Image (tube, coloured by chain):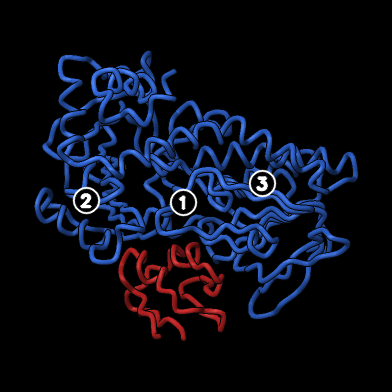
Amino acid sequence: MRSSYDVIIVGAGPGGSITAKTCAQAGLEVLLIEKRQEIGDPVRCAEGVGKEGLIHHIEPDSRWIAAELKGSMIFAPDGTEIKMSEEASSQKAGFNLERKIFDRVLAQQAAMAGADVMVKTRATGLLRSNGSISGIKVMYMGEVTEIKASIVIGADGVESKVGRWGGIDTSLKPVDINTCTQFLVSNIDAGEYNKFYIGEKYAPGGYLWLFPKGEHTANLGLGILGSKCGTVRPISLLHKFMETYMPQGKIIEMVVGGVPVSGPIKQTVANGLILVGDAARQSDPLTGGGIINAMDAGKIAGEVCIKAKEKGDYSVKILKEYEDRWRATIGKELSKSLMIKNLLIKVSDEQLNQLAHSLSGIDTSKMALPKVLPILFKKNPKILWELRTLFI
Amino acid sequence: MSVIVNRYKCGYCGACVGVCPAGALELVETWIEVDNTCTSCGVCAKICPVGALVVIK
């Protein structure tokens, strides 16, 4: 290990590893640290990704693809089913990953590109000099050391500390987080669609999901809005669902997690500092999906680091390009999703049923959500009036 | 003022760390550490997916 790097990335999830790989491929001196002793485990994720978004970053590999999907099915509280697909032309809309392997492969790719990697190594603070972040303090096996860097990347997930240490308030309010429990359930018929169950009946302010992970196995999870949590908890609601609808299912793994659903935050760069992925609250406020956004943001962050190194300037003046580029792409989508999320958390189960019924007779099976939404709006302007700016 | 973490319930997901307004919590491998900046506001206990946290006033 060196005592100084061009870029240190805190957190070896998909966002951190893509940043590390991008920087290392360009010849930058890179250190990727992960506080856990094992990269990718335990997961905190339903593991679904769109095919299109994924193949920009990595060639699909059967080692880490648990299932290929035909599309999604949404279930209204009364059981009405809406079938959708991301990909009108293809039967393969997306994948459910085996994150334990996927995350490891991405970290490995960063390592092969030249990045140093340290596991069981936790950032405990930032170094500063001349008004800029200039490295991190880390703890490894109980020993604290300092490592210098021109840029520190905070890819440290929902529990991110790097941003806060750098003066960026990333704390989430209860309404900004979905709190989740997930069981890996076996002895069930998982099907070929990702299933979403919406409404207070299942998951107040969130949804319940069933994502197939290969034969007779699926991620069965449930997330509720933090502001609606307390008297009910995701774990008890999920047990209740299983007892009612899936009594034969056997739980072979259990994970919990929090997903940022705040939408874009005000600031994600500072002098010598960039936030990426869940740490930058770049997960989708509607779906909770964050893998592809984190990887896209990681790519942009890496490219901006390369530019900063060329210019020898690590200040906000140069790093702001990251901010501009992710807001113009990921940020726009997050804002749209936030509008829909904010409406859906107010809509009653009865109204959700009405929305689902309004699609009867329309074949949505080859449409993705952006195509279905305008149809819903046209048929239910009263319920969805708040969203009108999305369609004008 | 502090929070008590029931380690037998905690799934070490870090959701509580993300919502703590004071930045008083930290997830270290499989356990949560609470420092003396905790204000007992209770947000962590509210959002915990498994109800592993109890606030002491």
Give the crowd class for mark 2: few <14, some 14-19, many >=20 residues within 10 Å.
many
Label 1 sits on a secondary structure element that is strand
Tell me the residue that label 3 is attached to. Answer: A110
CA distance separating discs 3 and 2: 34 Å
Label 2 sits on a secondary structure element that is strand
The red chain is B
Q: Are marks 3 and 2 on the same chain?
A: yes
Which amino acid type is shown beneath numbered disc 2? Answer: Ser
Residue A239, compared with residue A48, is above or below; it is below
Residue B26, compared with residue A251, is above or below; it is below
Question: Which of disc 2 and disc 3 is earlier in sequence?
Answer: 3
Q: Are marks 1 and 2 on the same chain?
A: yes
Side of A376 where A353 appears, left or right: left
Residue A199 appears in the picture as rendered = yes
- Identify the residue shown where x is 57% and y is 29%: A56
Q: Quadrant of the N terminus of chain A?
A: bottom right
Which amino acid type is shown beneath numbered disc 1? Answer: Pro
Front: mark 3 or 1: 1
CA distance separating discs 1 and 2: 28 Å
Residue A341: x and y in percent read: 37, 40
Q: Chain of mark 1?
A: A
Tell me the residue that label 1 is attached to. Answer: A260
Residue A363: x and y in percent read: 22, 15
Name the disc covering residue A242, or none: none
CA distance separating discs 3 and 1: 26 Å
Residue A290: x and y in percent read: 48, 43
Which amino acid type is shown beneath numbered disc 3? Answer: Ala
